[in-house]
Amino acid sequence: MSDAYILGIESSCDETGAAVVRSGEQILSNVVFSQIATHMPYGGVVPELASREHLRAIVPVVRKALADARQSYPSVDAIAVTQGPGLAGALLVGLSYAKALAFALDKPLIAVNHLEGHIHAVLLEERQKGNHEVNFPVLALVVSGGHTHLYLAEQKGNSWSYENIGHTRDDAAGEAFDKVAKLLGLGYPGGPIVDRLSSHGDPQAVKFATSQIKHPDRNDCGKNDRGKKDGKLKDGHGGFDFSYSGIKTAVLRYVETHNLAPAIEKRRRELSAIEKPKFEDYLALCEPETRNLVASFQRAMVDDLVAKTLAAAEAHEVATLFVSGGVAANNELRQRFEQDAALQGLRVFFPSRPLSTDNAAMIAAAAYPKWLAKDFAPMDFSAEASLPLERL
Ligand code: KG4
Ligand code: ZN
């Protein structure tokens, strides 16, 4: 089989990405232009600004990805692009550019689900390390700013299928990190700073009762009878849902009852006066009570994500666990998954940190089986903000 050089394009949220990946197993280039600086003053992603920034960045980012890979527009074999889920306006920028390239160059166009991309980030890096063996079934936790989803993934030939067995009922885990960080005057995005601050606080200091992370009835949203092998679950669908709006409210309550508002306001003011705050600035501006609160919040999030995912892995007798998406960059989450999965005899794989957050290499990698299967997108396909990942 000859090699395929796929140009991937990603623009679903606040990162403009382009990458060239050879045959789903070797990253030749991976360029990510982050818009964090644009959105930071607003404490979150502003969709209109995201679209505008993608428009500005897309051409230079793609050019750089081709140059870094020593490729050219005519030399790549196909153009892959994120179709969804994501911000509609942001997706449209990548998609329109990918369509224009495919049309002008007369190359196949491949539509990729962003969540499938996050799952294939793990596979891409394992193949790059020479590990081509994956023991199925695979359970993938995709945990990011927009998603906290559990998928059972299977491969049959060049075709991948995914079954969603759990998802967040309200906020995604990354969204909770971002909202709590914003609430505490720590800016945007919250995950990386909460991650680093947590190792400077006491994770036992504040008790977040499990009831604050609501555990819905495990069997209450079964839509089918796809059932469980060992009968532990009556329904195959929706057995392991997450919920993170409760813990966010619990942090807010803590802030109110402990009168942290003046300290938060002072921190917000002082951080905004620093052009590029360093970690030491955040640390210096966080009194022990806030550090403890942050560490306790992170511990509760990690406890819940790990416990639910491992329970799902056990119930579905999976052989391999993937943890991917922006929150998979979290240090405590990685350590706990490694430690607790080992106790269960389960192998757990993460992408490297650059491939955990949004990037286009994962899109080009997920496109490779579709390229082999000649699963090409028609020129009139459109962006889908809520595109589900479910192919059985
Ligand atoms: O996958 P991603 O780049 O974009 C989406 O598809 O959402 O994920 C971004 C999310 C943000 O919510 C960010 O705060 C979170 O991932 N994140 C982290 C860490 N790094 C990024 N959350 C916890 N710990 C981290 N180290
Ligand atoms: Zn993502």
Image (cartoon, rainbow, N blue to C red):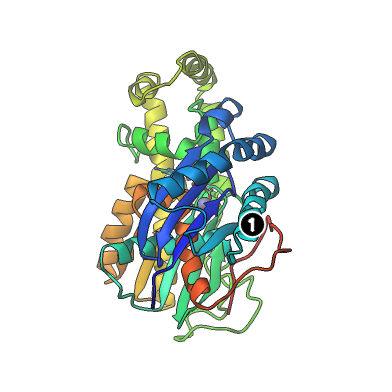
In the shown orientation, is residue 54 left or right of residue 32? right
- Residue lying at 63% horizontally and 71% vertically, measured from the top left: 220
Residue 353 image position (x, y, % from top left): 36, 48
- Residue lying at 51% horizontally and 46% vertically, measured from the top left: 62
Residue 101 image position (x, y, % from top left): 61, 55
| The quarter of the displayed image where residue 324 is located | bottom left
| The quarter of the displayed image where residue 225 is located | bottom right
| Label 1 CB less than 8 angstroms from ligand 2 | no
Dot 1 alpha-carbon crowd within 10 angstroms: few under 14, some 14 to 19, many 20 or more: few
Badge 1 amino acid: Ala
Residue 164 image position (x, y, % from top left): 55, 70
In the shown orientation, is residue 128 left or right of residue 239? left
Decide if residue 301 is in sight here.
no
- Residue lying at 36% horizontally and 51% vertically, measured from the top left: 333
The residue wearing badge 1 is: 104
In the shown orientation, is residue 307 left or right of residue 46? left
- Residue lying at 45% horizontally and 40% vertically, measured from the top left: 191
Q: Look at the picture and state if 62 lies above or below 337.
A: above
| The quarter of the displayed image where residue 123 is located | bottom left
Q: Look at the picture and state if 120 lies above or below 72.
A: below
Count of number-bearing discs: 1
User: Which of the image's four quarters has the N terminus?
Assistant: bottom left
Residue 227 image position (x, y, % from top left): 54, 83
Decide if residue 21 is in sight here.
yes
Q: Look at the picture and state if 132 lies above or below 252.
A: below
Q: Nearer the viewer, residue 298 or 334?
A: 334
Residue at disc 1, secondary structure: helix
User: Which of the image's four quarters has the C terminus?
Assistant: bottom right
